[in-house]
Image: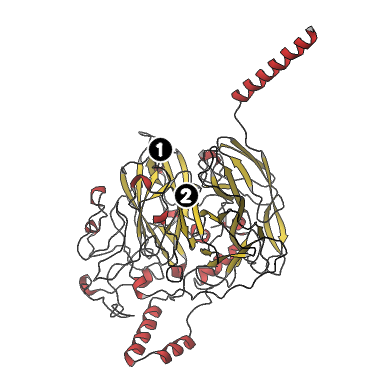
Amino acid sequence: MWISRFWTALRQLSLAGAVLVAVAAPALAQRYDLTLEERVVNVDGTDRPAVTVNGQFPGPLLRLREGEEAVVRVTNRMDKESSIHWHGLILPASMDGSPGFSPGFTQGVGPGQTFEYRFPVRQAGTYWYHAHNLDHEQRGLYAPIVIEPREPEPFRYNRDHVVQLSEWTDERPARVLQNLKRDPGYYNWNRRTLVDLLRDLGRAPSGEARRAIVRDRLDWAEMRMDPTDIADITGATYRYLVNGFRPETPATLLFRPGERVRLRLINSGAMTYFDVRIPGLRMTVVQADGNNIRPVVVDELRIAVAETYDVIVEPREDRQYQILAETMDRTGWARTRLAPRMDAPVEPLPQHRPRPVLTMTDMFMNPGPTGLDRGTPRPERDQPGHVWPSSGMSHGDMSGTGGGQMQGQAAPPGGQAMDHAAMGHGGTGSSTPMGMNHAAMGHGSPGAAGAHGPGTLATTTAGGMQAHAGHGGMAMADPVVQDTGAPPGARVLSYRDLRPLRPDPEWRPYDRIIEVRLTGNMERYIWSMNGNEFWRAQPIVARRGERLRIRFTNETMMNHPMHLHGMWMVPDLGNGAFNPRKHVVNIKPGTSLDVDVLVDAEGDWAFHCHLLYHMESGMMRIFRVTRDGAPVASAQQPTPVAMPAGHDH
């Protein structure tokens, strides 16, 4: 009897001890060991070297759990430094994985070395990881992350699939960048030709229409641009993938009719925007960039580079459904399929929608403010040729399809002509806009954010931008509405649809505004922020605890998906505490958008355009967060600064 009681007491003590250990020790997420290697893959019919993770291309899915600690050991078996950045994760700066930014991570993970990432998992949702350099990210070092929530999710589903979009090129990334530097239209096979001109003239209904066509061609030629120049790199060299599979041989995602299927859409492309739709199914968007939102039903959505969206679909028929991701410039497809069986025959791809074509209206962009705080310790000077030019247009009449001054617009000061080469499309124009009253444009101070003088462009304000009027009545682009070419009546997702389930507990009015103008020179393939490439620029300095408003103004004709490491960005859509938190905010060409930053993470962080070749060509900054009263180390830092190790500039 006493022996039985002894063992019972011993078991109770053991259980109590186990509980004490469990309480004392932090819970660990599953430990991962990742090995980076070069291996040969054959994506497009030719053997080419790729970067693999644990032998996989793309890399393996990592599953973490909110509230636990993640431990990931990364071993580099390549002959060059590499890195892994945990995209969208809120973690200590030392664990962010950005060479040259993260403390103690100056060179990344060296050849033959192992680096242990260890960080608390503070969020849930769909994210991804990738290398933070040109060569390795473009050649396959990217993969999904799924973080299980601590609390039950506010939506239900029966099945869960990752849909990771990306692209592949047989060319080495450094060669692609070299080609773009030599000719920014190198990969644009959609350029208009003499045959197109003759066809358009033959279809013109009148002599005036033909003259307008000729004027339009001359205008674009003068700017050394083509209205079909939508993407820097196109299907001329890229092959578009879903989970590593080409559209001709798509992966099969299984379902049973009547199930609710969760699709985790991740755009891991280096340079490609995708328009996603599923013919025969509507998508209920439930998460954006890992954060829950009020469910919104859409027919399609545009996913910018590095964004993630979680959608739920309900396929009821016993047949396959194509998940189609059409490139924004209409030069290629990424595709996978939902099917009830693995052996379902592959359906043909549909015809592309008409390619988008820019107009002269698109070319009249918001010139952006000058003299506003840029967040740098010392005043900055714009580099010539990067920014909005110094005066008016030289095109003739822009009230129609082409030609001179717009109706209702005053002549430029001094009658000077606008040098479109300086619009980020070539040449070396002046860097200081003349004759513009930017205070009247709402760019002066927080108190003036909603003020718009007569005849000036409207920018986003606390109420959001519904339409840009001014400049003689020419309407400017809405900064968040996406035109995917969807048929009339189809609903396309907009940032205005992204409303969190509960008000943001940290919402409050912003403390100050800084300007971040997205600038560059397309003719020389230089990309910059506030007229300065990374290696010429000072850090942007913020104080921990402030709510910083960034007024983005895109002075280029390209979309720019802007990404800030380590902190959330909150686009101001006029919804106050119900504006969404995002880790990537797309800034459309010729538009302005206010974005608040919750400055709550001390250290140096990368802040950049997530178009990989734009970042490598200079559109990146150090975002330095200091404690209140701490000295700003960068105030004595000489300019230029070096590109961080691991980047291939």
In this rendering, the answer to whether 351 lies above or below 609 is: below
Disc 2, disc 1: CB below 8 Å? no
Label 2 environment density (alpha carbons within 10 Å; few <14, some 14–19, many ≥20): many
In this rendering, the answer to whether 558 lies above or below 540 is: below
In this rendering, the answer to whether 196 lies above or below 522 is: below
Residue 4 horizontal side relative to residue 405, left or right: right
Q: Position of residue 142 (x, y in %)?
A: 61, 53
Q: Quadrant of the N terminus?
A: top right
Residue 271 horizontal side relative to residue 160, left or right: left
Residue 404 horizontal side relative to residue 495, left or right: left
Label 1 environment density (alpha carbons within 10 Å; few <14, some 14–19, many ≥20): many
Q: Which numbered mark, 2 or 1, is in the foreground of this view?
A: 2
Quick one: 339 or 211, which is closer to the camera?
Answer: 339
Task: Give the residue at mark 2.
Answer: 583
Instruction: Tell me what residue is drawn at x 47 percent, y 87 percent.
Output: 194
What amino acid does circle 2 point to? His
Mark 1, secondary structure of its residue: strand
Q: Position of residue 306 (x, y in %)?
A: 52, 55
Residue at mark 2 to residue at mark 1: CA–CA distance: 21 Å
What amino acid does circle 1 point to? Thr
Residue found at the far top of this picture? 2
Task: Give the residue at mark 1.
Answer: 626
Observer able to see residue 313:
yes
Instruction: Tell me what residue is drawn at x 58 percent, y 35 percent.
Output: 68
Quick one: 417 or 27, which is closer to the camera?
Answer: 27
Q: Position of residue 204 (x, y in %)?
A: 39, 89
Residue 65 horizontal side relative to residue 452, left or right: right
Where, by quadrant of the figure, is residue 592 drawn? bottom left
Instruction: Tell me what residue is drawn at x 19 percent, y 63 percent.
Output: 454
